Amino acid sequence: MIKFNEKLKKVCIEKNNRLCLGLDIDNHNLVNSSLDYMQSYILDIIDATIDLCPIYKVNFAFYERYGSKGYKILENISKSIEGRAISIADAKRGDIGNSSKYYAEGIFDSLNFDSITVSPYMGVDSIEPFAKYNRGIFILCLTSNPGSKNIQKINDSNNIEIYQHIVKMAIEMNENNNIGLVVGATNVDYMNTIKSISNDLPWLMPGVGFQGGNLKESLNIENRGLSIINVSRGILTYGEKTLDDIREATEKYTNEIRSFL
Amino acid sequence: MIKFNEKLKKVCIEKNNRLCLGLDIDNHNLVNSSLDYMQSYILDIIDATIDLCPIYKVNFAFYERYGSKGYKILENISKSIEGRAISIADAKRGDIGNSSKYYAEGIFDSLNFDSITVSPYMGVDSIEPFAKYNRGIFILCLTSNPGSKNIQKINDSNNIEIYQHIVKMAIEMNENNNIGLVVGATNVDYMNTIKSISNDLPWLMPGVGFQGGNLKESLNIENRGLSIINVSRGILTYGEKTLDDIREATEKYTNEIRSFL
Protein backbone atom coordinates (compact mmCIF):
# COMPACT_ATOMS: atom_id res chain seq x y z
CA MET A 1 0.00 0.00 0.00
CA ILE A 2 1.30 3.47 -0.90
CA LYS A 3 2.51 5.42 2.14
CA PHE A 4 0.98 8.81 2.91
CA ASN A 5 4.05 10.90 2.10
CA GLU A 6 4.38 9.14 -1.27
CA LYS A 7 0.70 9.66 -1.98
CA LEU A 8 1.05 13.35 -1.12
CA LYS A 9 3.91 13.71 -3.57
CA LYS A 10 2.05 11.75 -6.25
CA VAL A 11 -1.04 13.96 -6.06
CA CYS A 12 1.10 17.12 -6.15
CA ILE A 13 2.93 15.87 -9.24
CA GLU A 14 -0.31 14.85 -10.97
CA LYS A 15 -1.81 18.31 -10.48
CA ASN A 16 1.57 20.02 -11.01
CA ASN A 17 0.94 22.14 -7.93
CA ARG A 18 1.89 22.57 -4.29
CA LEU A 19 -1.09 24.67 -3.30
CA CYS A 20 -3.12 23.82 -0.23
CA LEU A 21 -6.37 25.77 -0.09
CA GLY A 22 -7.26 26.52 3.51
CA LEU A 23 -11.05 26.39 3.84
CA ASP A 24 -11.24 28.85 6.73
CA ILE A 25 -14.66 30.24 6.03
CA ASP A 26 -16.18 32.83 8.35
CA ASN A 27 -19.88 32.78 7.56
CA HIS A 28 -20.30 36.32 8.91
CA ASN A 29 -18.35 37.54 5.90
CA LEU A 30 -20.68 35.84 3.40
CA VAL A 31 -23.73 37.35 1.70
CA ASN A 32 -25.85 34.86 3.62
CA SER A 33 -24.64 33.84 7.08
CA SER A 34 -26.72 30.67 7.46
CA LEU A 35 -24.78 27.45 8.00
CA ASP A 36 -26.61 25.81 5.10
CA TYR A 37 -25.38 28.54 2.78
CA MET A 38 -21.88 28.32 4.24
CA GLN A 39 -21.74 24.59 3.57
CA SER A 40 -22.99 24.82 -0.01
CA TYR A 41 -20.58 27.70 -0.68
CA ILE A 42 -17.66 25.61 0.60
CA LEU A 43 -18.66 22.57 -1.43
CA ASP A 44 -18.95 24.80 -4.50
CA ILE A 45 -15.46 26.21 -3.84
CA ILE A 46 -14.08 22.70 -3.70
CA ASP A 47 -15.75 21.78 -6.99
CA ALA A 48 -14.53 25.00 -8.62
CA THR A 49 -10.88 24.45 -7.68
CA ILE A 50 -10.28 20.73 -7.33
CA ASP A 51 -8.76 20.24 -10.77
CA LEU A 52 -6.00 22.64 -9.64
CA CYS A 53 -5.66 22.00 -5.89
CA PRO A 54 -3.91 18.85 -4.69
CA ILE A 55 -4.65 19.60 -1.03
CA TYR A 56 -7.35 21.20 1.12
CA LYS A 57 -6.85 22.12 4.76
CA VAL A 58 -9.81 22.52 7.06
CA ASN A 59 -9.23 24.49 10.25
CA PHE A 60 -11.57 22.87 12.75
CA ALA A 61 -11.95 26.06 14.82
CA PHE A 62 -14.07 27.63 12.08
CA TYR A 63 -16.55 24.74 12.35
CA GLU A 64 -16.44 23.75 16.01
CA ARG A 65 -17.61 27.23 16.87
CA TYR A 66 -21.04 25.96 15.81
CA GLY A 67 -20.95 22.77 17.88
CA SER A 68 -22.47 19.62 16.40
CA LYS A 69 -23.89 21.56 13.43
CA GLY A 70 -20.39 22.66 12.50
CA TYR A 71 -19.14 19.13 12.93
CA LYS A 72 -21.76 17.97 10.47
CA ILE A 73 -20.28 20.38 7.90
CA LEU A 74 -16.81 18.92 8.53
CA GLU A 75 -18.20 15.49 7.71
CA ASN A 76 -19.63 16.74 4.42
CA ILE A 77 -16.46 18.61 3.45
CA SER A 78 -14.41 15.48 3.98
CA LYS A 79 -16.84 13.45 1.86
CA SER A 80 -16.68 16.03 -0.91
CA ILE A 81 -12.87 16.01 -1.11
CA GLU A 82 -12.51 12.23 -0.74
CA GLY A 83 -10.68 10.61 -3.65
CA ARG A 84 -10.23 13.91 -5.50
CA ALA A 85 -7.52 15.57 -3.37
CA ILE A 86 -5.72 15.20 -0.03
CA SER A 87 -7.63 16.53 2.98
CA ILE A 88 -5.90 17.88 6.09
CA ALA A 89 -7.83 18.11 9.36
CA ASP A 90 -6.15 21.15 10.90
CA ALA A 91 -7.26 20.20 14.39
CA LYS A 92 -3.98 20.42 16.37
CA ARG A 93 -4.91 17.50 18.62
CA GLY A 94 -2.70 15.71 21.13
CA ASP A 95 -3.41 13.92 24.42
CA ILE A 96 -2.27 10.88 26.40
CA GLY A 97 -2.13 7.70 24.32
CA ASN A 98 -5.61 6.35 24.98
CA SER A 99 -7.24 9.72 24.27
CA SER A 100 -5.16 10.35 21.15
CA LYS A 101 -6.32 6.94 19.91
CA TYR A 102 -9.91 8.14 20.13
CA TYR A 103 -9.06 11.46 18.49
CA ALA A 104 -7.48 9.46 15.66
CA GLU A 105 -10.66 7.37 15.37
CA GLY A 106 -12.68 10.57 15.16
CA ILE A 107 -10.57 12.23 12.50
CA PHE A 108 -9.58 9.18 10.43
CA ASP A 109 -12.37 6.59 10.90
CA SER A 110 -15.38 8.76 11.58
CA LEU A 111 -14.63 11.92 9.56
CA ASN A 112 -12.30 10.11 7.13
CA PHE A 113 -9.72 12.87 6.70
CA ASP A 114 -6.46 11.90 4.97
CA SER A 115 -4.25 13.68 7.49
CA ILE A 116 -4.17 15.78 10.64
CA THR A 117 -2.12 18.46 12.37
CA VAL A 118 -1.02 17.56 15.92
CA SER A 119 0.47 19.52 18.80
CA PRO A 120 3.65 17.96 20.24
CA TYR A 121 3.66 19.37 23.79
CA MET A 122 2.70 16.01 25.34
CA GLY A 123 5.41 14.11 23.50
CA VAL A 124 5.89 10.95 21.45
CA ASP A 125 3.18 8.77 22.99
CA SER A 126 0.59 11.49 22.34
CA ILE A 127 1.35 11.30 18.59
CA GLU A 128 1.92 7.55 18.13
CA PRO A 129 -1.77 6.57 17.95
CA PHE A 130 -2.19 8.85 14.92
CA ALA A 131 1.01 7.62 13.28
CA LYS A 132 -0.16 4.00 13.40
CA TYR A 133 -2.68 4.82 10.70
CA ASN A 134 -1.57 5.02 7.09
CA ARG A 135 -2.60 8.68 7.14
CA GLY A 136 -0.56 11.86 7.34
CA ILE A 137 0.54 13.52 10.58
CA PHE A 138 1.79 17.11 10.41
CA ILE A 139 3.46 17.93 13.72
CA LEU A 140 3.53 21.59 14.80
CA CYS A 141 7.19 22.55 14.63
CA LEU A 142 7.66 26.29 14.12
CA THR A 143 4.51 28.35 13.76
CA SER A 144 4.12 31.78 12.21
CA ASN A 145 2.48 33.58 15.15
CA PRO A 146 4.22 35.83 17.71
CA GLY A 147 3.77 33.19 20.44
CA SER A 148 6.22 30.91 18.63
CA LYS A 149 8.89 32.59 20.75
CA ASN A 150 7.33 31.54 24.08
CA ILE A 151 8.15 27.81 23.84
CA GLN A 152 9.29 26.87 20.34
CA LYS A 153 12.32 29.17 20.24
CA ILE A 154 13.64 28.49 23.75
CA ASN A 155 17.24 27.31 23.66
CA ASP A 156 18.08 24.15 25.56
CA SER A 157 21.27 23.67 27.58
CA ASN A 158 23.07 22.55 24.39
CA ASN A 159 21.93 25.64 22.49
CA ILE A 160 19.36 23.66 20.52
CA GLU A 161 15.96 25.26 20.18
CA ILE A 162 12.79 23.37 21.06
CA TYR A 163 11.49 23.36 17.49
CA GLN A 164 14.66 21.50 16.52
CA HIS A 165 13.82 18.84 19.10
CA ILE A 166 10.48 18.48 17.32
CA VAL A 167 12.22 17.91 13.99
CA LYS A 168 14.37 15.19 15.57
CA MET A 169 11.33 13.59 17.19
CA ALA A 170 9.44 13.70 13.88
CA ILE A 171 12.25 11.96 12.00
CA GLU A 172 12.39 9.21 14.62
CA MET A 173 8.63 8.73 14.37
CA ASN A 174 8.58 8.50 10.58
CA GLU A 175 8.72 4.69 10.34
CA ASN A 176 5.56 4.61 8.23
CA ASN A 177 6.64 7.50 5.99
CA ASN A 178 3.62 9.50 7.08
CA ILE A 179 5.07 12.26 9.27
CA GLY A 180 5.40 15.89 8.20
CA LEU A 181 6.09 19.23 9.85
CA VAL A 182 4.16 22.47 10.17
CA VAL A 183 6.65 25.22 9.37
CA GLY A 184 5.52 28.84 9.28
CA ALA A 185 6.67 30.56 6.09
CA THR A 186 7.60 33.80 7.79
CA ASN A 187 11.31 33.56 8.52
CA VAL A 188 13.86 32.37 6.00
CA ASP A 189 16.66 31.87 8.54
CA TYR A 190 14.60 29.48 10.61
CA MET A 191 13.44 27.71 7.47
CA ASN A 192 17.04 27.16 6.46
CA THR A 193 17.88 25.75 9.89
CA ILE A 194 14.99 23.31 9.73
CA LYS A 195 15.82 22.37 6.15
CA SER A 196 19.30 21.34 7.23
CA ILE A 197 17.97 18.79 9.71
CA SER A 198 14.53 17.67 8.49
CA ASN A 199 15.66 15.07 5.92
CA ASP A 200 12.84 14.27 3.51
CA LEU A 201 9.89 15.15 5.74
CA PRO A 202 7.22 17.16 3.92
CA TRP A 203 6.39 20.62 5.23
CA LEU A 204 2.99 22.17 5.55
CA MET A 205 3.60 25.91 5.31
CA PRO A 206 1.00 28.39 6.52
CA GLY A 207 1.73 32.10 6.58
CA VAL A 208 1.98 32.61 2.82
CA GLY A 209 -0.64 34.66 1.02
CA PHE A 210 -2.13 37.40 3.12
CA GLN A 211 1.36 38.43 4.23
CA GLY A 212 2.57 38.01 0.62
CA GLY A 213 6.09 37.84 -0.68
CA ASN A 214 7.22 34.62 0.92
CA LEU A 215 5.99 32.22 -1.71
CA LYS A 216 9.14 32.31 -3.77
CA GLU A 217 11.42 32.03 -0.77
CA SER A 218 9.36 29.21 0.66
CA LEU A 219 9.67 27.23 -2.54
CA ASN A 220 13.28 28.28 -3.17
CA ILE A 221 14.55 27.02 0.12
CA GLU A 222 12.61 23.88 -0.43
CA ASN A 223 13.65 20.98 1.68
CA ARG A 224 14.37 17.49 0.41
CA GLY A 225 10.76 16.62 1.14
CA LEU A 226 7.92 18.59 -0.32
CA SER A 227 6.82 22.12 0.58
CA ILE A 228 3.06 22.50 0.63
CA ILE A 229 1.98 26.12 0.44
CA ASN A 230 -1.19 26.87 2.37
CA VAL A 231 -3.21 29.89 1.32
CA SER A 232 -6.51 30.73 2.96
CA ARG A 233 -7.53 34.39 3.06
CA GLY A 234 -5.38 35.25 0.04
CA ILE A 235 -7.77 33.17 -2.05
CA LEU A 236 -11.01 33.24 -0.07
CA THR A 237 -11.23 37.03 0.17
CA TYR A 238 -10.21 37.73 -3.41
CA GLY A 239 -12.36 40.19 -5.39
CA GLU A 240 -16.04 39.88 -4.60
CA LYS A 241 -15.57 36.31 -3.33
CA THR A 242 -17.68 34.85 -6.12
CA LEU A 243 -16.76 31.36 -7.31
CA ASP A 244 -15.22 32.97 -10.39
CA ASP A 245 -13.07 35.21 -8.19
CA ILE A 246 -11.94 32.28 -6.08
CA ARG A 247 -11.16 30.27 -9.19
CA GLU A 248 -9.16 33.22 -10.51
CA ALA A 249 -7.17 33.62 -7.28
CA THR A 250 -6.49 29.87 -7.22
CA GLU A 251 -5.20 30.05 -10.80
CA LYS A 252 -3.05 33.04 -9.87
CA TYR A 253 -1.37 31.20 -6.98
CA THR A 254 -1.10 28.03 -9.03
CA ASN A 255 0.65 29.84 -11.87
CA GLU A 256 2.99 31.55 -9.42
CA ILE A 257 3.87 28.24 -7.78
CA ARG A 258 4.35 26.53 -11.14
CA SER A 259 6.71 29.30 -12.24
CA PHE A 260 9.02 28.40 -9.36
CA LEU A 261 8.86 24.60 -9.65
CA MET B 1 -18.81 39.49 38.68
CA ILE B 2 -17.07 36.63 40.48
CA LYS B 3 -13.88 35.49 38.73
CA PHE B 4 -13.54 31.89 37.61
CA ASN B 5 -10.86 30.89 40.11
CA GLU B 6 -12.95 32.32 42.96
CA LYS B 7 -16.03 30.52 41.71
CA LEU B 8 -14.06 27.27 41.53
CA LYS B 9 -12.98 27.66 45.13
CA LYS B 10 -16.49 28.60 46.24
CA VAL B 11 -18.07 25.51 44.68
CA CYS B 12 -15.37 23.27 46.19
CA ILE B 13 -15.97 24.75 49.63
CA GLU B 14 -19.74 24.45 49.31
CA LYS B 15 -19.50 20.75 48.45
CA ASN B 16 -16.55 20.25 50.82
CA ASN B 17 -14.72 18.36 48.12
CA ARG B 18 -11.94 18.61 45.56
CA LEU B 19 -13.05 15.74 43.37
CA CYS B 20 -13.33 16.16 39.62
CA LEU B 21 -15.16 13.25 38.01
CA GLY B 22 -13.71 12.59 34.57
CA LEU B 23 -16.56 11.47 32.30
CA ASP B 24 -14.35 9.38 30.01
CA ILE B 25 -16.94 6.86 28.93
CA ASP B 26 -16.03 4.15 26.45
CA ASN B 27 -19.38 2.87 25.17
CA HIS B 28 -17.81 -0.44 24.16
CA ASN B 29 -17.45 -1.24 27.85
CA LEU B 30 -21.13 -0.67 28.57
CA VAL B 31 -23.90 -3.28 28.57
CA ASN B 32 -25.40 -1.47 25.59
CA SER B 33 -23.00 0.22 23.20
CA SER B 34 -25.50 2.54 21.47
CA LEU B 35 -24.78 6.25 21.70
CA ASP B 36 -28.28 6.89 23.05
CA TYR B 37 -27.61 4.52 25.93
CA MET B 38 -24.18 6.04 26.49
CA GLN B 39 -25.68 9.51 26.76
CA SER B 40 -28.45 8.53 29.16
CA TYR B 41 -25.94 6.58 31.27
CA ILE B 42 -23.69 9.65 31.52
CA LEU B 43 -26.55 11.96 32.40
CA ASP B 44 -27.64 9.48 35.09
CA ILE B 45 -24.07 9.39 36.47
CA ILE B 46 -24.09 13.16 36.73
CA ASP B 47 -27.44 13.14 38.56
CA ALA B 48 -26.25 10.37 40.90
CA THR B 49 -23.08 12.21 41.95
CA ILE B 50 -23.69 15.94 41.60
CA ASP B 51 -24.46 16.57 45.27
CA LEU B 52 -20.90 15.37 45.98
CA CYS B 53 -18.89 16.45 42.93
CA PRO B 54 -17.95 20.10 42.52
CA ILE B 55 -16.37 19.52 39.09
CA TYR B 56 -16.84 17.32 36.02
CA LYS B 57 -14.23 16.98 33.29
CA VAL B 58 -15.21 15.82 29.84
CA ASN B 59 -12.43 14.49 27.64
CA PHE B 60 -13.50 15.46 24.13
CA ALA B 61 -11.64 12.55 22.50
CA PHE B 62 -14.21 10.09 23.86
CA TYR B 63 -16.98 12.00 22.06
CA GLU B 64 -15.31 13.32 18.91
CA ARG B 65 -14.60 9.75 17.92
CA TYR B 66 -18.27 9.66 16.90
CA GLY B 67 -18.20 12.88 14.86
CA SER B 68 -21.22 15.18 15.01
CA LYS B 69 -23.23 12.59 16.98
CA GLY B 70 -20.59 12.64 19.70
CA TYR B 71 -20.59 16.43 19.65
CA LYS B 72 -24.32 16.39 20.25
CA ILE B 73 -23.71 14.38 23.43
CA LEU B 74 -21.15 16.97 24.57
CA GLU B 75 -23.82 19.64 24.20
CA ASN B 76 -26.23 17.66 26.36
CA ILE B 77 -23.62 16.88 29.02
CA SER B 78 -22.78 20.56 29.34
CA LYS B 79 -26.48 21.43 29.67
CA SER B 80 -26.95 18.80 32.35
CA ILE B 81 -24.07 20.09 34.51
CA GLU B 82 -24.87 23.78 34.01
CA GLY B 83 -25.49 25.62 37.27
CA ARG B 84 -25.00 22.52 39.40
CA ALA B 85 -21.21 22.08 39.18
CA ILE B 86 -18.19 23.36 37.25
CA SER B 87 -17.66 21.77 33.83
CA ILE B 88 -14.22 21.39 32.23
CA ALA B 89 -13.95 20.84 28.48
CA ASP B 90 -10.81 18.72 28.36
CA ALA B 91 -10.17 19.58 24.72
CA LYS B 92 -6.50 20.67 24.78
CA ARG B 93 -7.04 23.30 22.10
CA GLY B 94 -4.61 25.97 20.94
CA ASP B 95 -4.04 27.74 17.62
CA ILE B 96 -3.13 31.16 16.24
CA GLY B 97 -5.18 33.97 17.76
CA ASN B 98 -8.02 34.14 15.24
CA SER B 99 -8.54 30.37 15.34
CA SER B 100 -8.33 30.16 19.12
CA LYS B 101 -11.02 32.85 19.23
CA TYR B 102 -13.31 30.54 17.30
CA TYR B 103 -12.39 27.55 19.45
CA ALA B 104 -13.31 29.68 22.47
CA GLU B 105 -16.64 30.53 20.85
CA GLY B 106 -17.27 26.83 20.28
CA ILE B 107 -16.45 25.73 23.83
CA PHE B 108 -17.78 28.72 25.77
CA ASP B 109 -20.57 30.25 23.68
CA SER B 110 -21.85 27.28 21.73
CA LEU B 111 -21.25 24.37 24.16
CA ASN B 112 -21.31 26.62 27.25
CA PHE B 113 -18.58 24.86 29.24
CA ASP B 114 -17.27 26.70 32.30
CA SER B 115 -13.62 26.03 31.49
CA ILE B 116 -11.20 24.39 29.06
CA THR B 117 -7.79 22.74 28.94
CA VAL B 118 -5.38 24.29 26.42
CA SER B 119 -2.04 23.24 24.95
CA PRO B 120 0.67 25.93 25.24
CA TYR B 121 3.01 24.97 22.38
CA MET B 122 1.93 27.93 20.21
CA GLY B 123 2.45 30.44 23.03
CA VAL B 124 0.70 33.36 24.69
CA ASP B 125 -1.35 34.64 21.75
CA SER B 126 -2.82 31.16 21.23
CA ILE B 127 -4.26 31.22 24.77
CA GLU B 128 -5.29 34.87 25.10
CA PRO B 129 -8.61 34.55 23.22
CA PHE B 130 -9.76 31.97 25.79
CA ALA B 131 -8.51 34.02 28.74
CA LYS B 132 -10.58 37.04 27.66
CA TYR B 133 -13.70 35.14 28.72
CA ASN B 134 -14.64 34.98 32.38
CA ARG B 135 -14.19 31.21 32.16
CA GLY B 136 -11.42 28.94 33.36
CA ILE B 137 -8.30 28.08 31.35
CA PHE B 138 -6.19 25.13 32.51
CA ILE B 139 -2.89 25.25 30.65
CA LEU B 140 -1.04 21.96 30.14
CA CYS B 141 2.08 22.27 32.28
CA LEU B 142 3.44 18.88 33.34
CA THR B 143 1.48 15.87 32.21
CA SER B 144 1.52 12.35 33.66
CA ASN B 145 2.38 10.41 30.48
CA PRO B 146 5.85 9.13 29.46
CA GLY B 147 6.02 11.74 26.65
CA SER B 148 6.23 14.52 29.23
CA LYS B 149 9.99 14.05 29.00
CA ASN B 150 10.15 14.84 25.25
CA ILE B 151 9.41 18.58 25.53
CA GLN B 152 8.16 19.51 28.99
CA LYS B 153 11.24 18.36 30.89
CA ILE B 154 13.88 19.79 28.54
CA ASN B 155 16.27 22.09 30.37
CA ASP B 156 16.84 25.52 28.88
CA SER B 157 20.23 27.24 28.79
CA ASN B 158 19.61 28.59 32.32
CA ASN B 159 18.76 25.13 33.65
CA ILE B 160 15.06 25.91 33.78
CA GLU B 161 12.75 23.24 32.45
CA ILE B 162 10.10 24.01 29.85
CA TYR B 163 7.18 23.25 32.18
CA GLN B 164 8.54 25.97 34.48
CA HIS B 165 8.34 28.42 31.60
CA ILE B 166 4.68 27.46 31.32
CA VAL B 167 4.11 28.26 34.99
CA LYS B 168 5.69 31.69 34.52
CA MET B 169 3.62 32.32 31.39
CA ALA B 170 0.44 31.25 33.22
CA ILE B 171 1.08 33.64 36.10
CA GLU B 172 1.63 36.51 33.68
CA MET B 173 -1.60 35.67 31.88
CA ASN B 174 -3.70 35.51 35.04
CA GLU B 175 -4.99 39.09 34.94
CA ASN B 176 -8.60 37.89 35.08
CA ASN B 177 -7.94 35.33 37.83
CA ASN B 178 -9.07 32.54 35.54
CA ILE B 179 -5.87 30.65 34.70
CA GLY B 180 -4.94 27.26 36.14
CA LEU B 181 -2.40 24.53 35.44
CA VAL B 182 -2.67 20.87 34.48
CA VAL B 183 -0.19 19.07 36.73
CA GLY B 184 0.09 15.28 36.59
CA ALA B 185 -0.08 13.76 40.06
CA THR B 186 2.61 11.19 39.42
CA ASN B 187 5.83 12.75 40.71
CA VAL B 188 6.09 14.48 44.06
CA ASP B 189 9.45 16.14 43.32
CA TYR B 190 8.11 17.88 40.26
CA MET B 191 4.96 18.87 42.12
CA ASN B 192 7.08 20.48 44.81
CA THR B 193 9.05 22.42 42.20
CA ILE B 194 5.87 23.71 40.59
CA LYS B 195 4.34 24.52 43.96
CA SER B 196 7.29 26.77 44.75
CA ILE B 197 6.66 28.96 41.70
CA SER B 198 2.97 28.72 40.83
CA ASN B 199 1.62 31.27 43.34
CA ASP B 200 -2.10 30.83 43.84
CA LEU B 201 -2.95 29.24 40.49
CA PRO B 202 -5.31 26.27 40.84
CA TRP B 203 -4.10 22.88 39.65
CA LEU B 204 -6.08 20.31 37.75
CA MET B 205 -4.46 17.00 38.66
CA PRO B 206 -5.03 13.92 36.53
CA GLY B 207 -3.17 10.69 37.21
CA VAL B 208 -4.76 9.95 40.58
CA GLY B 209 -7.10 6.97 40.88
CA PHE B 210 -6.26 4.09 38.62
CA GLN B 211 -2.62 4.40 39.61
CA GLY B 212 -3.71 4.86 43.24
CA GLY B 213 -1.70 6.05 46.21
CA ASN B 214 -1.03 9.59 45.09
CA LEU B 215 -4.16 11.19 46.46
CA LYS B 216 -2.71 11.96 49.87
CA GLU B 217 0.54 13.28 48.48
CA SER B 218 -1.27 15.39 45.90
CA LEU B 219 -3.36 17.05 48.58
CA ASN B 220 -0.51 17.20 51.09
CA ILE B 221 1.78 19.11 48.86
CA GLU B 222 -1.07 21.36 48.00
CA ASN B 223 -0.14 24.65 46.46
CA ARG B 224 -1.41 28.02 47.59
CA GLY B 225 -4.17 27.68 45.02
CA LEU B 226 -6.49 24.76 44.96
CA SER B 227 -5.70 21.18 43.96
CA ILE B 228 -8.48 19.56 41.99
CA ILE B 229 -8.20 15.78 41.95
CA ASN B 230 -9.43 14.21 38.74
CA VAL B 231 -10.55 10.59 38.88
CA SER B 232 -12.00 8.86 35.85
CA ARG B 233 -11.52 5.10 35.59
CA GLY B 234 -11.11 4.70 39.36
CA ILE B 235 -14.77 5.64 39.67
CA LEU B 236 -16.26 4.70 36.29
CA THR B 237 -15.02 1.09 36.35
CA TYR B 238 -15.86 0.42 40.01
CA GLY B 239 -17.73 -2.83 40.78
CA GLU B 240 -20.33 -3.67 38.16
CA LYS B 241 -20.48 -0.05 36.97
CA THR B 242 -24.09 0.34 38.10
CA LEU B 243 -25.15 3.79 39.25
CA ASP B 244 -25.02 2.49 42.83
CA ASP B 245 -21.43 1.34 42.30
CA ILE B 246 -20.44 4.68 40.82
CA ARG B 247 -22.12 6.52 43.65
CA GLU B 248 -20.26 4.29 46.13
CA ALA B 249 -16.88 4.93 44.46
CA THR B 250 -17.57 8.66 44.39
CA GLU B 251 -18.37 8.58 48.11
CA LYS B 252 -15.19 6.60 48.76
CA TYR B 253 -12.99 9.17 47.00
CA THR B 254 -14.92 12.04 48.55
CA ASN B 255 -14.42 10.65 52.05
CA GLU B 256 -10.73 10.08 51.38
CA ILE B 257 -10.30 13.63 50.11
CA ARG B 258 -12.25 15.08 53.05
CA SER B 259 -10.04 13.17 55.48
CA PHE B 260 -7.03 15.06 54.15
CA LEU B 261 -8.58 18.54 53.94
Image: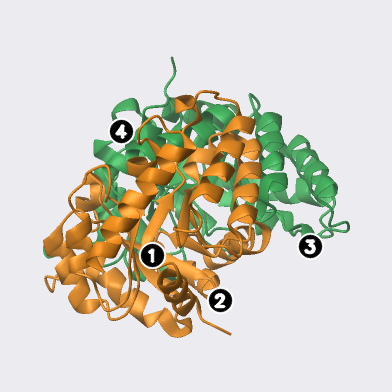
Chain colours: A orange, B green
The circle drawn on residue B28 is 3
According to the picture, the residue beneath numbered tag 4 turns out to be B174
Q: Secondary structure at mark 1?
A: strand
Q: Which residue is mark 1?
A: A139
Residue A114 pos. (x, y %) = 55, 65
Q: Is residue B136 above or below residue B238?
A: above
Are labels 3 and 2 assigned to the same chain? no
Residue depicted at 35% across the width and 32% down the height: A239
Q: Earlier in the sequence, mark 2 or mark 1?
A: 2
On whether disc 2 and disc 1 are found on a single subunit, the reply is: yes
Q: Is residue A244 above or below residue B25?
A: above
How much space separates mark 3 and mark 4, taking CA atoms?
40 Å
C-alpha separation, residue under disc 4 versus residue under disc 1:
29 Å
Question: In the rendering, which numbered label is found on residue A134?
Answer: 2
Task: Measure the C-alpha gap from mark 1 to mark 3.
Answer: 30 Å
Q: Is residue A85 visible?
A: yes
Q: Are marks 1 and 3 in contact (CB under 8 Å)?
A: no
| Mark 2 vs mark 1, CA separation in Å | 15 Å
Q: Residues within 10 Å of mark 4 (few under 14, many from 20)?
A: some
Disc number lying in front (4 or 1): 1
Q: Label 2 is placed on what type of residue?
A: Asn
